[in-house]
Image (cartoon, rainbow, N blue to C red):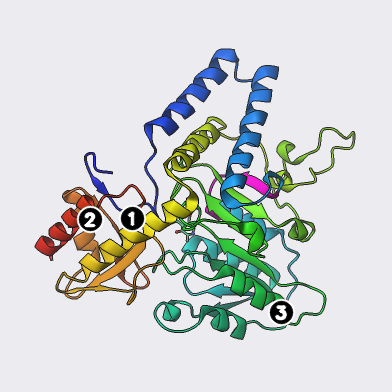
Amino acid sequence: MKLNKSYFNYGGQGPMSPAALDAILATYQQIQSQGPFGIKTSSLVTQESNLTRQAIALELGISAESIALTENVTVGCNIALWGLNWQPGDRILVSDCEHPGVIASIKEICRRFQVIIDFCPLLATLNTGDSVAVITAHLQPQTRLVVISHVLWNTGQVLPLAEIAASVRQYPHENRQIRILVDAAQSVGLLPLNLSELGIDFYAFTGHKWLCGPEGVGGLYIHPDAMESLAPTFIGWRSLDYSKLELPLINDARRYEVATSAYPLYAGLRAAIAIHQEWGSSIDRASKIVSLATYLWENLQQVPQIKCLNQTAPQSGLVSFQVGSGNHGKLVQALEKEHFYLRTIVDPDCIRACTHYFTTTAEIDELIQCLSRLI
Ligand SMILES: Cc1ncc(COP(=O)(O)O)c(C=O)c1O
């Protein structure tokens, strides 16, 4: 994807295609021309929401009823975090590779409800070690929730979620099951997914990263068995079942949706998903992403002074590396001046480059040349 830049920040935000932008504009125009508030528009926005949940459901291997549309990953994590019935002394187990926004929310829960946060060291399992064993070893009788990412945003490591879920499920508990919340910021649109096979409770994702949709549309998957344990923290007219006189909460994940949103963005996300599906299956897309990341990883190692965090070929589209003598911030700035878009990561101190399935080997070659020149 080279127009006026070489873009390697898909884990931050994916670029929108003209088709996605057109779909957003066309939907805004339609709503404005038929009247932004009226019976016709009301049924249009309901249809937009339903179609969008269905399109996402197909990508994630789940039913549309188990998806609540949100604005981003963090809102989805917050719905899961704040909706559980916290008791003083409960514990939350979190990996040491989680995003600061999610950690901040967990810390506030700990402060308000006298809950204890435990960290488990997954960063150290990138090249050696067993993430399943590390997580299991850090569970305690009071652990109520495990919070982990599917793909670690700092190193690109892919966690074996099914094995982790099976191991957590086996941990003895009296009557309160340990729930699992997954931060899916870096997995949706990157990995082929069949969530119904994973055995996790909550999976929070966004459309604006690997799916290349607009910023402002994401979602939360809630396993049907976990719904009863998750009270909606924010409630609004969208949460209610209008087919019943008493207006109860809707009996599916829509109960976690609240009120008015920028509905035309939903059409943009669906257009973005359609483009990916046209290109190939989720398995083919993931395999291309990983093969391009591997090409990048192999070539980075040919540059003197560069050390990739991964000692073996990457499992995702995220490739993180350190420069022996360098100030990573300065190098990223210098790269951007030359139209190469990468980012720094604070912990571990490194630079992260992402490949999508439409990244070209020519772009990667040019990045390597530019890096060799600048270091
Ligand atoms: C792992 C992870 N979690 C959460 C976020 C925040 O995403 P959002 O802005 O969609 O809430 C990011 C963004 O980079 C991320 O990488």
Magenta extent: 66-74
Residue under label 2: 364
The answer to which image quadrant residue 303 occupies is bottom left
Q: Is residue 140 above or below residue 310?
A: below
Residue 38 seen in render:
no
Which badge, 3 or 1, comes first in the chain's sequence? 3
Q: Quadrant of residue 294?
A: bottom left
Mark 1 and ligand 1: say if the CB distance to the nearest ligand atom is below 8 Å.
no
Q: Quadrant of the C terminus?
A: bottom left
**Where is residue 291 drawn, in percent x and y?**
34, 60
Please tell me how crowded label 1 is: few (under 14), some (14-19), or many (20+) other residues with Cα within 10 Å. Answer: many
In depth, the one of 274 and 32 nearer the eye is 274
Secondary structure beneath dot 3 equals helix
Residue 161: image location, x then y, percent: 57, 68
Give amino acid for label 3: Gln
C-alpha distance separating marks 2 and 3 = 44 Å
Instruction: Report the disc number at residue 105.
Output: none
Separation of marks 3 and 1 at Cα, in angstroms? 37 Å
Residue under pointer 3: 170
Q: How far is disc 1 from disc 2 in space, using C-alphas? A: 9 Å
Where on the picture, by quarter, is residue 289? bottom left
- Is 166 positioned to the left or the right of 369 in the image? right
Rendered position, 223 above or below 172: above
Nearest the viewer among 270 and 216 is 270
Q: Is residue 45 magenta?
A: no
The residue positioned 37% from the left and 51% from the top of the image is 10
Q: Secondary structure at mark 1?
A: loop
Q: Which residue is under mark 1?
A: 355
Label 2 CA crowd tier, 10 Å (few <14, some 14–19, many 20+):
many
